[in-house]
Image (cartoon, rainbow, N blue to C red):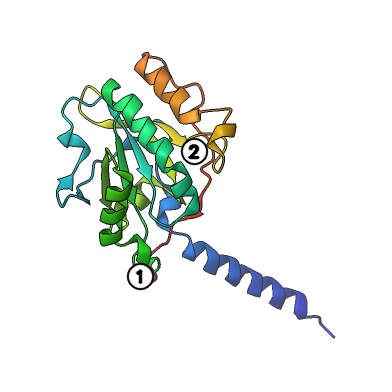
Amino acid sequence: MKNTTTPLLYMVCLLFVGFLMAAIPASDSGYQVGDTARDFKLKNVDGKMVSMSDYKNAKGFIVTFTCNTCPYSVAYEDRIIDLHNKYAPKGYPVIAINPNDVQVSPKDSYQDMQVRAREKKFPFAYVYDETQEITKAYGATRTPHLYVVQKQKDGKFKVAYIGTIDDNSREPEKVQKKYAEAALDELVSGKAVSQPNTKAIGCTIKWREA
């Protein structure tokens, strides 16, 4: 008698894998280092629309996908503030983008963003990617997920660094490698980034349910 169990199991596995692949958001095919990053126009916590092109004197940006609720994001908030305070005067301000869908993560609502920004006295723009279009374009998958982009002579923005801020997400006093700072220091000095990619550590982005 012919054994049909193995072929049937194989087909079931293929269908399951296909389902998982279909469920992966388009952001997994986002920017790589060296790519040109698109600008955006997103609503800031002060009610104004913010674009990178609004910053006429900027040399680049620390685009950080973060949120109110992820414990990793909360743990990094002070370090993100420090990055802005250190590098905004050198031409690289932070723009923080909340990518989470409010239906999936209610505490990441625009109103809650406003509250959090006031509580922490964010010195940078904190904008909401309500449609998640920009998050998918950039390829962010975690909060926090950091992209350093450098402004080119033609006004476009080239991705120079993608990844994490440093090597200790929970205990800042134990940080040994400050990856984002090292990349920014090299850019400020006119050098190429020697370690342009690291792995982002954090919560998965809360994608809008179909």
- Label of residue 57 in the image: none
| Residue name at image x 57 percent, y 39 percent | 171
Q: Secondary structure at mark 2?
A: loop
First of labels 2, 1 by sequence position: 1
Q: Residue 83: percent from the left, percent from the top?
A: 38, 31
Residue 21 visible within the image: yes
Q: Residue 126: percent from the left, percent from the top?
A: 28, 46
Q: Whole-Å distance between the Cαs marked 2 and 1?
A: 27 Å
Residue 151 visible within the image: no
Q: Residue 145: percent from the left, percent from the top?
A: 44, 44
Vertical relation: 52 (above or below) 129: above
Hey, what amino acid is under mark 2?
Answer: Thr
Hey, what amino acid is under mark 1?
Answer: Gln
Left-right relation of 91 to 161: left
Q: Nearer the viewer, residue 138 or 20?
A: 138
* Residue found at the very far bottom of the displayed protein: 1
Question: What residue did someone put label 1 on?
Answer: 103
Q: Quadrant of the N terminus?
A: bottom right
How would you rate the neighbour count of disc 2 (Cα within 10 Å): few for under 14, some for 14-19, many for 20 or more?
A: many
Q: Residue 104: percent from the left, percent from the top?
A: 40, 68
Question: What residue did someone put label 2 on?
Answer: 164
